Image (cartoon, rainbow, N blue to C red):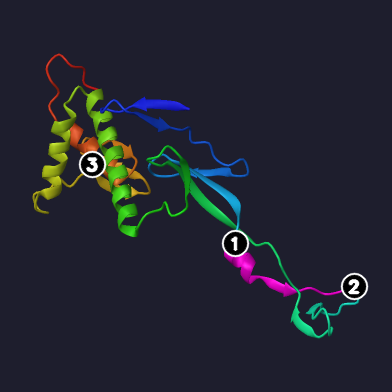
């Protein structure tokens, strides 16, 4: 079991996140955690799922008074009930590994995470395209934001959507991808390449 020293000098347990043997990995959460699935014994449903026990002749069995033989109450048996759960693993502050079923978060949290992920992907693609032309990625982003905030009549009419994932750029070339990627490619065309840098 690994130990991590905190800033206060007190060792903190960081157990390895090992899932139950009967579980199966079925996906990855947006935050990178592995999502598992398994069958879990449902105590409440099992307790409520009672049926009367029948004898070999198909007659209900009863608990009887030991002296009079009077029927007191039916003999009941429970049938195990299982349900499929999805969960992620988390480390507790005390160094335990716990199963967390409600890990999806609220609608607002999922929307926020999705926007954050898209923004990161956008920035990564922007930096890649700008670097290929020897341009500062921040300058390209500023150019894109200026065009997005401009008045309709002042905005550059490119990229033009040609259908599907194809966009016509102002230099006559066609860019394949989504609108955000096409906007980046168009903005790169309008940036000045520093002297001494190759123009791709």
Report the quarter where the C terminus lies: top left
Residue 179 in the image: x percent, y percent?
28, 46
Crowdedness of circle 2 by 10 Å Cα count: few (<14), some, many (20+)?
Answer: few
In magenta segment, residue 178: no
Task: Magenta stretch: give its range.
Answer: 44-56
| Apparent side of residue 120 relative to residue 105 in the rendered image (left or right) | left
**Crowding at mark 3 (Cα within 10 Å: few <14, some 14-19, many 20+):** many
On the question of residue 161 being in view, the answer is yes
Question: Is the residue marked by circle 1 packed among few (<14), some (14-19), or many (20+) residues within 10 Å?
Answer: few
Vertical placement of 51 versus 163: above or below? below
Total numbered badges shown on the rendered structure: 3
Identified at 90% across, 73% down, the residue is 56
Determine which residue is flagged by label 2: 56
Q: Residue furthest top?
A: 196
The residue nearer to you, when weighing 110 against 4, is 4
Q: Position of residue 14 (x, y in %)?
A: 42, 32
Picture residue at 49% right of the left edge, 49% below the top: 87
């Amino acid at each position: 079991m690994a130990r991590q020293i905190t800033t206060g000098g007190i060792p903190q347990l960081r157990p390895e996140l090992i899932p139950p043997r009967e579980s199966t990995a079925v996906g990855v959460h947006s935050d990178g955690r592995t999502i598992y699935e398994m069958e879990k014994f449902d105590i409440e449903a099992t307790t409520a799922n009672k049926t009367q026990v029948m004898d070999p002749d198909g007659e209900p069995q009863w608990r009887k008074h030991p002296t009079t033989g009077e029927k007191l109450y039916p003999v009941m048996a429970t049938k195990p009930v299982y349900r499929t759960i999805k969960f992620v693993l988390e480390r507790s502050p005390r160094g335990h590994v716990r199963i967390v079923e409600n890990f999806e978060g609220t609608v607002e949290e999922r929307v926020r995470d999705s926007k954050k992920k898209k923004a990161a992907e956008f920035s990564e693609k922007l930096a890649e395209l700008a670097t290929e032309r020897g341009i500062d990625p921040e300058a390209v982003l500023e150019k894109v934001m200026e065009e997005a905030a401009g008045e309709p009549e002042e905005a550059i009419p490119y990229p033009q959507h040609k259908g599907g994932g194809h966009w016509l750029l102002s230099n006559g070339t066609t860019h394949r991808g989504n609108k955000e990627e096409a906007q980046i490619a168009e903005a790169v065309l309008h940036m000045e390449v520093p002297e001494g840098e190759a123009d791709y």
